[in-house]
Image (cartoon, rainbow, N blue to C red):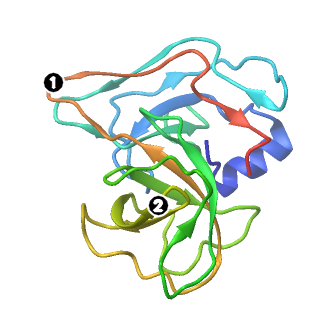
Amino acid sequence: MPLTTTGKNDVLTNGLTNFTHVTANSDLSGTEVATSRVAVTWTSASAGVRDNNAQLSVPIPAAGTAVVGSIRSASTSGNEEATLQIGSTLRGVGSVDAIATDLIQSDGHGLIADDRVFFTTVAGESLPTGLSATTLYWVISSGLTTDAFKVSTSQGGAAVDITALGEVAFFKTVPNTFASAGNLVFSTGALDVDANFV
């Protein structure tokens, strides 16, 4: 799961003591779609990873769309500490090596056309200009190979114009729209806090 700046600072200062509740967001700007937050209990660290030690069910209202999960520092209010992909574990690191192509290079990335991805920074660097951490993108067929992909802000749309070189971490998520009220379920071990990934 990608940590916010607040989350990174809290991990360094407090371990996971501020990672207390999980919820669901309707976007990457922190807007909650869940009707309440669910308390998280973490496993002990092992090989640089900590996970939730039980299944968690986050209530979503009818017609609500969960785009990503969110770790918060309190049962109400508080800070957003991290976002987490839903419906997929596919993630990776890539680089923009030539701005003329708008391609993100990532060996064996595993993405296909119409996958939804979001980006975060790598090692505190800025995202390449043209990409935003608060936008959910579509992978497009143009330029798509085993080791490279382009993204658009619309399904099958024009490639995002990337105008600076740099590295990115990407996460595939599967937005989930609830026709009637239901629960977004995170299975035991799904909330990886992985100190080994970026």
| Amino acid at dot 2 | Thr
Does residue 47 appear to the left or right of 169 in the view shown? right
Q: Residue at (65%, 17%) from the top-left corner?
A: 41
Q: Nearer the viewer, residue 179 or 71?
A: 179
Mark 1: secondary structure: loop
Q: Nearer the viewer, residue 81 or 145?
A: 145
Q: Which residue is mark 2?
A: 145
Q: Earlier in the sequence, mark 1 or mark 2?
A: 2
Does residue 194 appear to the left or right of 78 in the view shown? right
The image quarter containing residue 177 is top left
Q: Residue at (85%, 27%) from the top-left corner?
A: 47
Task: Give the foreground label among 1 and 2.
Answer: 2
| Amino acid at dot 1 | Ser
Q: Residue at (73%, 45%) from the top-left corner?
A: 197
Quarter of the image for the N terminus: give it.
top right
Q: Is residue 79 visible?
A: no
Percent position (x, y) of residue 153?
32, 67
Percent position (x, y) of residue 53?
65, 13
Q: Is residue 2 visible?
A: yes
Percent position (x, y) of residue 169?
62, 57
**10 Å neighbourhood of mark 1: few (<14), some, or many (≥20)?**
few
Extreme-front residue of the structure: 146
The image quarter containing residue 49 is top right
**10 Å neighbourhood of mark 2: few (<14), some, or many (≥20)?**
some
Extreme-top residue of the structure: 54
CA distance for labels 1 and 2? 38 Å
Q: Which residue is mark 1?
A: 180
Percent position (x, y) of residue 14?
82, 38
Identify whether 184 is placed above or below 126: above
| Residue 76's disc number | none
Report the label total. Answer: 2
Does residue 63 appear to the left or right of 158 in the view shown? left
